[in-house]
Amino acid sequence: MFSIVIAIGWPIWPLIIASIVALALIIERSLALRRARILPPRLLNDVLSLHAKRQVSNDVVDKLEDSSPLGRVLAAALRNERAPREVAHEAVANAGGHAAHDLSRNLSLLGSIGSIAPLMGLLGTVIGMIEIFASQQAGSSPQQLAHGISIALYCTAFGIIVAVPAILAYRHFKSRIEDFVVDMEDEAQKLLDTLFSPRAP
């Protein structure tokens, strides 16, 4: 494999760098987008319990806001408990938008790698074939010409190999984030219903 990389030359190195970056992004997003980290399972119940006991202080809201993306959304609702419901709803939507933006961090780069990796591979192949046909030595030997073309085509293959998992991971993470946002909206709506219920203190 290393001999093929050496034979291809400099066009393969951008793809190798892109593959390393894509792998790092996939690992980072896999760790960052764990459900328990984004939507702690008992967080809403704990908030409702504290609110029922009138134990929601500014310190509690600050800690809640820093705890998780869901906590950030719920904290926005608590901060606007005494405001009109429309204002509280707008604050929650704004917090949810910021949370979704943070969850999508680095995804655009991963998607870009998946999109341009095949083009980078094709560019390497074209450059390699230009060099082959421009070489008198390659042109004088059909076997050497065929070997040179096969080496150049490795660039295209490597570009596809890099692109496929990057695009699949990008789509998977986008879908996961969309699910998280919907669940955060549902949790926030439950809290708003409690805060602005006529029975609420």
Image (tube, helix red, strand yellow):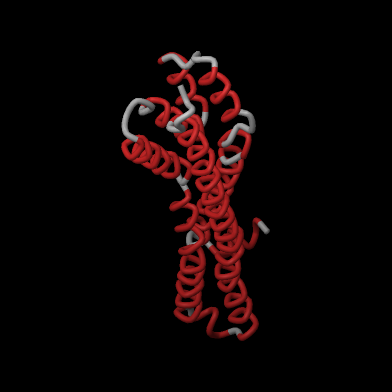
In-image side of 157 versus 87 (left or right) = right
Tell me where residue 5 sits by quadrant. Answer: bottom right
Does residue 18 lie above or below 35 as drawn? below
Q: Residue 16 or 200: which is nearer the viewer?
A: 200
In-image side of 8 versus 85 (left or right) = right
In-image side of 93 versus 47 (left or right) = left
- Numbered circles on residues, count: 0
Residue drawn at 58 percent across, 81 percent down? 145
Q: Residue 93 or 196: which is nearer the viewer?
A: 196
Location of residue 131 in the rendering, given as x and y in whole percent from the top left corner: 46, 74
Does residue 26 lie above or below 46 as drawn? below
Location of residue 3 in the rendering, given as x and y in whole percent from the top left corner: 65, 59
Q: In which quadrant is the N terminus drawn?
A: bottom right
Location of residue 171 in the rendering, given as x and y in whole percent from the top left corner: 55, 58
Residue drawn at 48 percent across, 19 percent down? 63
Residue drawn at 39 percent across, 42 percent down? 93
Q: Residue 144 or 48: which is nearer the viewer?
A: 48
Name the outermost residue toward the right.
1
Residue drawn at 46 percent across, 32 percent down? 197
Location of residue 17 in the rendering, given as x and y in whole percent from the top left corner: 51, 51
Q: In which quadrant is the C terminus drawn?
A: top left
Q: Residue 41 or 35: which is nearer the viewer?
A: 41
In-image side of 27 versus 112 (left or right) = right
Tell me where residue 85 sits by quadrant. Answer: top left
